[in-house]
Image (spheres, grey):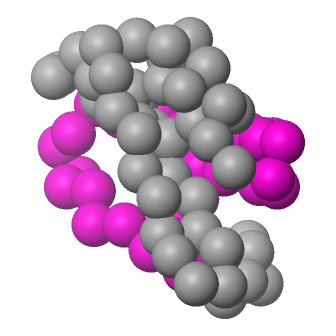
Amino acid sequence: MAQKFAAHPAWLLDIPPEAVVNVQEVALRGGPALLMEDFDEKRATVIWSTSERMYSVSSKNRELSLKIASALP
């Protein structure tokens, strides 16, 4: 897991221990990403990075966030 975090710095997150969050790796067209589902705030966020940028897409549900993230270059 440490090697994955080193390769994808967008994955360095600060999630409070009391937060009810599901975090998992997902595959996008451009490579791996991190999906965070915050069940307290009812929000799904997809985070990924390239060599030049860090991207984040949030919406009220997992399917929409993944669909938008997959559509981006």
The relative height of residue 59 versus residue 72 in the rendered view (above or below) is: above
Question: On the image, which quarter does residue 67 sit in?
Answer: top right
Q: Is residue 39 visible?
A: no
The relative height of residue 19 versus residue 63 in the rendered view (above or below) is: below
**Residue toward you, 12 or 71:** 71
Instruction: Please give left or right for residue 44 compared with residue 53 in the image.
Output: left
Instruction: Please give left or right for residue 51 compared with residue 30 in the image.
Output: left
The relative height of residue 54 versus residue 67 in the rendered view (above or below) is: below
The relative height of residue 19 versus residue 56 in the rendered view (above or below) is: above
Horizontal and vertical percent for residue 4? 74, 75
Q: Residue at horizontal 54%, vertical 26%?
A: 68
Horizontal and vertical percent for residue 6? 66, 88
Q: Is residue 37 visible?
A: yes
The residue segment tinted magenta is 8-35
Instruction: Please give left or right for residue 28 compared with residue 36 in the image.
Output: right
Q: Is residue 24 magenta?
A: yes
Q: Is residue 23 magenta?
A: yes
**Residue toward you, 16 or 24:** 24
Q: Residue at horizontal 17%, vertical 43%?
A: 18
Question: On the image, which quarter does residue 14 sit in?
Answer: bottom left
Horizontal and vertical percent for residue 42? 24, 15
Residue, far front: 73
| Total number of numbered discs in the rendering | 0
Q: Quadrant of the N terminus?
A: bottom right
**Residue toward you, 2 or 27:** 27
Horizontal and vertical percent for residue 44? 39, 27
Q: Residue at horizontal 41%, vertical 50%?
A: 56
Q: Residue at horizontal 66%, vertical 74%?
A: 50
